[in-house]
């Protein structure tokens, strides 16, 4: 028996040593795999950290450039110093930030593009400074034209920044996803390794002490790895009690991971945080993998986390869950800053007295400021996505149709339009700027329009003042000269049909006595009343003008015979004498000069009418005399 029994212990020992060696081999493989994963994770973290430094800097540079450009344009358009404030704020320290972007955020993968961003941004800074200098030296139009035009460098910069930010954000998101997957896989790997090591320990019962020490070392390695992952990792049972937490979770929520094991989640979170977690815990314990963003108050401050809860299943039963959380507070702050920047930009554009809009290649409205809403009297939310032809009146769209087509073909278009809208005629000066992509295709149009109705009205008023008499409202001498020249040209054609024309030269009898006796105010009333009487007496097609003082002229065209002018003169004399003018009974003398087919200048015709008036005055006033051109036949 002894000879038979002796080998048994050695056999069991050999098997135990064999299992122990296998356990050690498994531990070595597991340690190597975990070390490899830790090294890969460290590389991902370093890359993510570089991206995390670069993205906010890129965003700040783009935000500052946009604010600077918007502030400069607002200042040039409104001429208000307050509009330049965004420009000054954005320009402050921008060049230094560009240097920091290139020097403090080294990125071998994107270094050439970062250097190009800095080069384009500095060019844009110098350009805006030159534009402001032009404005300050009085060259306002040139400054405005340069500010509104030449968007090429800004487009390239915006595209380059957009590509960089998109590439970096996509890369960072990929890294974060990979880290989340690696963290989950590492947890499962760690737990699987622990299970394997535990099994080997049970088999290698003769090596309990050695196996226990190996397990302790393995657990420490696992904890070391978990403690260096930039995420909050936890393991909870079905009652929400903590089974495991890494150092990052303890640091964020202020507890020692080892001491917190066994505590329920309600004690680890604030009450409102625990209440917010409960619905998500119910879902994961029901077997569902849950992802969500949560806002949690930590040390009196709100922080944002992206959380993933994964069921811990065994034999089809959910025993608890794993929790992995990433702190996304910096990303949320960036999103808030972007939203605030967009809000400020919208406030600026909505309060500019300029129509700002963007339409796509199909002429569908994609953006419009508040000025568009007030102009077209539309709901912007309803208008976005609709075509300009649908939003405008037929007259307004037809005036712009060809120019819109030219703009969408890549031409920069400037135009002035005038149309009736909402019961009022409006005048606009518009600029269409193509939105051209890197491939040369036109994606849409930027539309800038200024309401120049007040300017057009002022021009019309000035033209009226320049051609009319201020006292009576009749055309003045300048306007009469032009009208008489044109009438003579027409008379040359109408003479072939036997038509005649006449000039009536009139003045108020004894007008100086009226002024001396009753004053100039009464004299002015007499002249205004006389002008009104003339308008009502002659035909609507006849031109009546005031030369100076009490001298008035009427140009009669298209007469069937020269004698018709005499009838008009008699009618004027009768109309004046039959009613008081300015409260006074006055009379008028009229000199009539007629013309048929003879050639005569406007000056000679006026001289002849003046001679006829002189004859009427010598004959006793309150009457008329006639001279027929080119003869001197006269009669009363």
Image: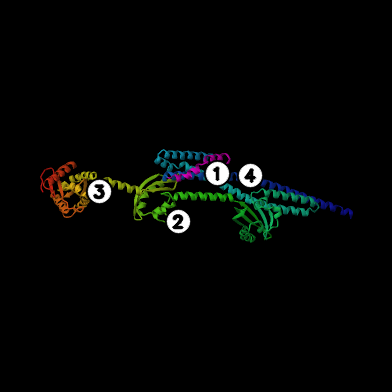
> Which residue shows up at 77% across the image and 55% down it?
202
Could you tell me which secondary element the residue under label 1 belongs to?
Answer: helix
Looking at the image, how many numbered discs can be counted on the residues?
Answer: 4
Q: Nearer the viewer, mark 4 or mark 1?
A: 1
The answer for how far apart the CA atoms under marks 3 and 1 are is 69 Å
Residue 359 in sight here: no
Q: Position of residue 173 (x, y in %)?
A: 58, 49
The answer for how far apart the CA atoms under marks 3 and 4 are is 90 Å
The answer for how far apart the CA atoms under marks 2 and 1 are is 33 Å
Q: Position of residue 196 (x, y in %)?
A: 73, 53
- Relative placement, left or right, of 370 versus 261 is left
Q: Nearer the viewer, mark 4 or mark 2?
A: 2
Label 1 belongs to which residue? 57
Q: Earlier in the sequence, mark 4 or mark 2?
A: 4
Could you tell me which secondary element the residue under label 4 belongs to?
Answer: helix
Look at the image and say whether residue 130 sits in the magenta stretch.
no
Q: Dot 4, crowdedness within 10 Å: few (<14), some or many (≥20)?
A: few
The answer for how far apart the CA atoms under marks 4 and 1 are is 22 Å
The magenta stretch is 80-109
- Relative placement, left or right, of 463 versus 94 is left
For the residue pair 100 and 347, the one nearer the viewer reads as: 347
Q: Position of residue 124 (x, y in %)?
A: 48, 40
Q: Earlier in the sequence, mark 3 or mark 1?
A: 1
Is 129 situated above or below 207? Answer: above
Contact, mark 3 vs mark 1 (Cβ under 8 Å): no
For the residue pair 257 and 113, the one nearer the viewer reads as: 257
Label 2 belongs to which residue? 381
Magenta segment's dominant SS is helix
Could you tell me which secondary element the residue under label 2 belongs to?
Answer: helix
Q: Earlier in the sequence, mark 4 or mark 1?
A: 4
Quadrant the N terminus occupies: bottom right
Label 4 belongs to which residue? 43
């Amino acid at each position: 028996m002894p000879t038979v029994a002796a080998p048994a212990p050695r056999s069991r020992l050999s098997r135990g040593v064999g299992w122990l060696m296998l356990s050690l081999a498994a531990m070595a493989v597991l340690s190597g795999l975990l070390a490899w994963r830790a090294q890969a994770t460290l590389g991902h973290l370093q890359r993510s950290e570089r991206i995390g430094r670069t993205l906010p800097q890129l965003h700040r540079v783009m935000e500052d450039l946009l604010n600077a450009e918007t502030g400069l344009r607002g200042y040039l358009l409104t001429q208000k110093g307050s509009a330049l404030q965004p420009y000054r704020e954005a320009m402050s320290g921008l060049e230094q930030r560009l240097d920091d972007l290139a020097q403090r955020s080294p990125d071998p993968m994107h270094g050439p593009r970062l250097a190009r961003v800095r080069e384009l941004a500095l060019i844009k800074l110098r350009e805006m400074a030159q534009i402001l200098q032009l404005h300050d030296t009085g060259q306002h139009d040139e400054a405005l034209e340069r500010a509104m035009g030449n968007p090429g460098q800004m487009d390239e910069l915006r595209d380059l920044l957009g590509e960089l930010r998109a590439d970096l954000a996509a890369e960072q998101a990929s890294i974060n996803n990979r880290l989340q997957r690696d963290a989950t896989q590492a947890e499962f790997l760690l737990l699987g390794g622990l299970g394997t090591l535990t099994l080997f320990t049970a088999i290698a019962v003769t090596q309990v002490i050695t196996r226990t020490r190996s397990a302790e070392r393995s657990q420490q390695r696992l904890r070391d790895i978990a403690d260096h992952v930039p995420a909050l990792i936890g393991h909870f049972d079905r009652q929400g009690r903590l089974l495991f937490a890494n150092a990052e979770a303890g640091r964020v929520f202020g507890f020692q991971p080892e001491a917190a094991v066994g505590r329920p989640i309600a004690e680890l979170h604030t009450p409102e945080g625990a209440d917010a977690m409960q619905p998500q815990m119910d879902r994961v314990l029901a077997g569902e993998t849950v992802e969500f963003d949560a806002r949690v108050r930590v040390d009196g401050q709100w922080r944002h986390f992206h959380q993933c809860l994964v069921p811990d299943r065994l034999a089809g039963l959910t025993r608890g869950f794993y929790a992995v959380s990433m702190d996304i507070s910096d990303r949320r702050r960036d999103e808030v800053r972007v939203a605030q920047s967009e809000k400020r930009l919208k406030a600026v554009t909505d309060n500019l007295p300029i129509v700002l809009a963007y339409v796509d290649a199909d002429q569908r409205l994609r953006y419009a400021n508040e000025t568009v809403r007030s102009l077209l009297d539309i709901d912007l939310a309803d208008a976005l996505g609709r075509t300009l032809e649908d939003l405008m009146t037929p007259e307004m769209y037809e005036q712009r149709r060809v120019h819109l087509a030219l703009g969408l073909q890549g031409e920069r278009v400037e135009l002035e339009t005038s149309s009736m809208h909402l019961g009022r005629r409006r005048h606009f000066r518009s600029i269409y700027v193509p939105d051209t992509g890197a491939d040369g295709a036109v994606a849409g149009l930027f539309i800038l329009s200024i309401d120049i109705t007040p300017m057009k009205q002022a021009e019309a008023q000035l033209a009226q003042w320049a051609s009319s008499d201020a006292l009576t409202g009749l055309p003045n001498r300048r306007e009469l000269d032009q009208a008489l020249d044109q009438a003579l040209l027409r008379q040359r054609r109408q003479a072939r049909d036997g038509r005649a024309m006449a000039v009536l030269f009139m003045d108020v009898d004894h007008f100086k006595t009226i002024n001396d006796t009753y004053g100039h105010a009464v004299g002015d009333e007499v002249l205004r009343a006389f002008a009104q009487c003339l308008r009502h007496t002659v035909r609507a097609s006849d031109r009546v003008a005031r030369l100076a003082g009490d001298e008035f002229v009427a140009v009669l065209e298209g007469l069937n015979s020269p004698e018709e002018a005499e009838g008009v003169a008699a009618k004027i004399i009768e109309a004046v004498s039959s009613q008081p003018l300015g409260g006074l009974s006055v009379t008028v003398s009229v000199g009539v000069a007629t013309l048929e087919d003879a050639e005569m200048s406007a000056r000679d015709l006026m001289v002849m009418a003046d001679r006829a008036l002189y004859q009427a005055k010598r004959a006793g006033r309150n009457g008329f005399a006639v001279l027929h051109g080119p003869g001197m036949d006269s009669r009363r």
